[in-house]
Image (tube, helix red, strand yellow):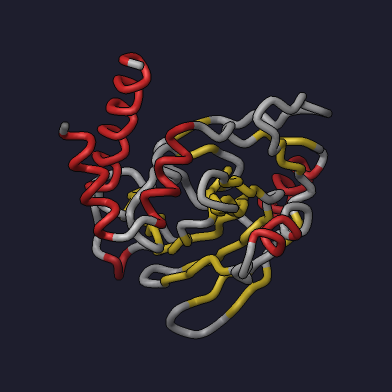
Amino acid sequence: MLSLRLLTLTLCTLFLAACARSPVVQLYDGPAKADSQVLTVKVPSEIEVFTINGKEVEGVNTFFATDFKELKLAPGRYEILAYYKELWQLDADNHEIVKSNPANFVIDGKAGDQWQLGFNQPQDVEQARAMEDSFSGWVANSKTGERVDAQESGLILNRGFLAPIAGEEVTTATSNSVAPQASAGAAAGATAASAKKSTTVAPEASYLDTLKAQWKQATAEERREFLQWIAE
């Protein structure tokens, strides 16, 4: 019991620290720049980023107690592989984390642009499950209204906690920044190479995943009660 309580306290400490952080993630090198000089991409909290231009990027999926997180990028072209992930409450004692296969969101943005990833929000867990193998969405320019449909990624997400890995796992470099693609031709080559991979693995659901999702769904009063319990 003591070890479980210690684990819970540790996870909650990390969780609350994440909540206190800004929902803005800088993904270019050097000092922070004004929004007029960078490309802003808003990502809904229900969408997790797997790679940007073929790289896993640190910090993009850190939990924030907001509806969106903002990625700040150098102007240019980006391919964002992202998937739907949400915890659904089935009843008072049971929940289910639903994850979809990733889609490829392509953005070619200029300095000062703001683009937002979007998708059709499921109304219940059945609709969410139906998206697992057919997740799609779009990116929309908040200023001009331009909208570009996401592309199929050709990748399959391993959703099971202990499910075996089938096929070839995609391996990617990890970074805390990402550069725009050099050209449309280079981007097409990278996409074709990625499409040859058949299977990718998302991080397994954990106690922290559950805490994050439940905190997001909790009311202000429930959050106060939880913090009081932690302080006991």
Q: Position of residue 69 (x, y in %)?
A: 38, 57
Work out whether residue 219 or residue 83 is closer to the camera in this orientation and state it. Answer: 219
Q: For the point 65% across and 67% down, which residue is it?
A: 137
Residue 197 shown left or right of residue 65 in the figure: right
In the rendered image, is residue 10 in sight?
yes
In the rendered image, is residue 182 in sight?
no
Tell me the quarter of the image containing the N terminus: top left
Q: For the point 65% across and 30% down, which residue is it?
A: 161
Query: Which corner quadrant of the image does residue 171 belong to?
Result: top right
Residue 60 shown left or right of residue 155 in the figure: left
Q: State the count of labels.
A: 0
Tell me the quarter of the image containing the C terminus: top left
Query: Which corner quadrant of the image does residue 41 belong to?
Result: bottom left
Q: Position of residue 15 (x, y in %)?
A: 31, 38
Q: For the point 50% across and 60% down, which residue is it?
A: 76
Q: Position of residue 29 (x, y in %)?
A: 33, 43
Work out whether residue 131 or residue 168 is closer to the camera in this orientation and state it. Answer: 131
Work out whether residue 121 or residue 195 is closer to the camera in this orientation and state it. Answer: 121
Determine whether 226 is above or below 168 in the image.
below
Query: Which corner quadrant of the image does residue 203 belong to?
Result: top right
Q: For the point 75% across and 59% down, which residue is it?
A: 130
Residue 72 shown left or right of residue 82 in the figure: left
Q: Position of residue 19 (x, y in %)?
A: 28, 47
Residue 16 shown left or right of residue 62 in the figure: left
Farthest residue, direction front: 92
